[in-house]
Amino acid sequence: MIIEIGHFALVLALAVALILSVVPVIGAARRDAAMMALAPVASLVLFGLVAFSFGVLTWAYVASDFSVKNVWENSHSLMPLLYKYTGVWGNHEGSMLLWLLIVVLFSALVVMFGKNLPETLKANVLAVQAWIASAFLFFILLTSNPFIRLDPAPAEGQDLNPILQDFGLAIHPPLLYLGYVGFSVCFSFAVAALIEGRIDAAWARWVRPWTLAAWTFLTAGIAMGSYWAYYELGWGGWWFWDPVENASFMPWLAGTALLHSALVMEKREALKIWTVLLAIMTFSLSLLGTFLVRSGVLTSVHAFATDPSRGIFILGILTLFIGGAFTLFAWRAPKLKSGGLFQPISREGALVLNNLILTVCCATVLTGTLYPLVLETITGEKISVGAPFFNLSFGLLMIPLLIAVPFGPLLAWKRADLMGAMQRLYAVIGFAFVAGLVLYYIENGGPVMAAAGLAMACYLMLGALADLWYRANFGKLAFNVAWRRLAGLPRSAFGTALAHFGLGVTVLGIIIVSTYETETVLEMKQGATAEAGGYSLVFDGMRHAVGPNYTDDQGHFTISKDGVVVADTWSSKRLYTARRMPTTEAGIVTFWFSQLYVSLGDPMDDGGIVVRIWWKPFILCIWGGCLIMMLGGFVSLSDRRLRVGAPSRKAKVAKPVTPVMEPAE
Amino acid sequence: MMRRVLIAIIILFSALPALAVNPDEVLKDPVLEQRARGLSAHLRCMVCQNQSIDDSNAELAKDLRVLVRERLTDGDTDEQVLDYVVSRYGEFVLLKPRLSAKTVLLWVAPIALLLIGALTMILFVRSRPPLKTVTPLSDQERARIDELSKG
């Protein structure tokens, strides 16, 4: 019974969403306060209904109600409780419901935090959010209903895909979706601004926190996915340029560009039209990502053609929203007046360069991902576009961007002095060069590109610190005065510095691990020793273990350095019994930022077993950098200026001796 | 979950998720082995989704790895090995497609977009009125500022 109520709540939600899609827009056009006032109430009701429906599905999972087809297909009574919860979105139907839940959650958040948004803008934004919600409600109800019953109900479920029975992957989708779908708010704001034909710095100030929040979550989601792939897939790769990864990376690139262009718009009222376009593009890429992943088109064009109903539906949504938004843009954008002028060499100019390169990077990933599909559809010829292509093209594009990163914050708005910024960075460049050489020396050489990469990473990290150094004016003022100035800097300044520093840390990790990683593949018998990264590993033998819904063959390794035992680890091959599906659980030992990664291969006839050992120097920097970037996002989000719904600036509470006149970042 | 499709494929085509190069395949000559690894990273496992033969455990990937090593031991250059593999399996096997009529758009797109973007920016900047140059402060104004900043 409760299952049917959950289903019914979803139908009711569709009705509410449809009303919400229309009435407030008319209200805004007619300046009818009553009609506009419907928007916040209906948005909260919509959220309540979808949340209830989601709750019902969760209940069905937790209670192992196998009369629900979705639960039977993706759950098992013996599965640990945590995975019963996360199993809700570990399948197509449930994940679409989660997608929808997050759309309406963001609408509800706009209602809660947007108390002082202009009435018409708020009504339009909530209505556009409801358009998206309606489209996905139709999609779920017509093609992906999670509430379908089975009669008679099976006694036992088919278990969740073992790969998904992992904490990292369990929290990966919600994080990713918070990012993906969070950009829907930016999209809604952009479309609402186009409908109204008016856009100003206040608009950018309202949009920026949402962009920042979505970007931060997306960064977290992608980093989480990458780390998961690293430890779970068993060969220590952390990024594969797989189309599914690209699908989440493209909105991230566009979102990063949006984050920076919204800054220009907020500060200088320039780049208005571009910012609106970027907001539309970012969410369009999120929709495209959803299409690519959900339609099965990536597996093969043919698989898509055999069961196209879902794919066609999302393609329809995609066309409708992207096409509609771009048409609206072409029609209304010329009405938006462009604002602030600036010279090419200025903070604005640097941010435009950032946008240009990030957009081209994004376009490159997009062409690379879709090219084989399009070519095959048109000519029937099959080609592959894989990691070697992306590493080359994306890598080359990143170089000028990375060089520009430390310059940006040091340039003044409107008109800047490039030589002046250069002089400030002399020390940074010098330090980076030396640091590159030192690391190069410590790691006993390597390709010249490695030294250059190391220097680049140091340059980024030191450049971020230099920004704070100069803002606080450490060189010129007395230390304690400068220190107080530093403490008085707006939080967003720290946010920027952290994010840019994090980027440097990630680059450092990528460069070192791709240059100095070692791989040892060998057959080991009990008691055998292998060397990796200056450590020796002794294989102590295998044991058999049984988990709640799997069996494990575990190998034990003792790790020592210079004859002293420093660690030990289990590396196992696991078999999930319900699906007869094997997985690897690599043994990973962390030494500072570096890791030893031990993975078991096939057993040999003579009693030995194939063992693969990787030494991954500085690998944790890759995700550590992402964490720092996220931290930067949150710190920036806590800036009083951006506190959602508080665009009106209050008088500064802190009164430093030297008035802080630094522009907020 | 975003990778479900990929994973399903990986699992479908791997007897066990143990991976890639096995000790018995490794060539004695470390230089040749290094070249073989480099080439393997550029060759697609034909039955997997977006995996190189270096990463894949599929039988076909193993056959290809062995084939690449055989050709290398026979004295082929890297280019000859790739040519040979392409002649047997088609362009599909290359993870970095070669520049040809059908891939020209793929290769040119990034450069073209960068140029178009830069050009648009330059034209846009040119089309706008230049910023007025700032006249330096007069002594009087400077004195006034000093006065104000003291107070």
Image: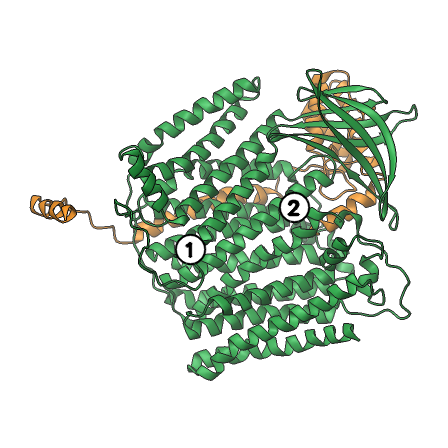
- A325 w.r.t. B115: above or below: below
Where's residue A312, x and y in %? Answer: 69, 64
Residue placed most toward the observer, A596 or A319? A596
Q: How many marks?
A: 2
Q: Which residue does the image show at 31% across and 31% down from the upper left?
A: A423
Residue placed most toward the observer, A110 or A368? A110
Q: Earlier in the sequence, mark 2 or mark 1?
A: 2
Marks 2 and 1 in Cβ contact (< 8 Å): no
Residue placed most toward the observer, A311 or A54? A54
**Quadrant holding the N terminus of chain A:** bottom right
Q: Which residue is mark 1?
A: A262
Chain of the residue where label 2 is placed in the rendered structure: A
Where's residue A126, x and y in %? Answer: 52, 71
Q: Nearer the viewer, mark 2 or mark 1?
A: 2
The CA distance from mark 2 to mark 1 is: 27 Å
* A324 to the left or right of A604: left
Colour assignment, chain A: green
The answer to whether residue B98 is visible is no
* A242 to the left or right of A584: left
- The circle drawn on residue A225 is 2
Residue placed most toward the observer, A492 or A367? A492
The answer to whether residue A115 is visible is yes
Give the amino acid at mark 1. Answer: Ala
Give the chain coloured orange.
B
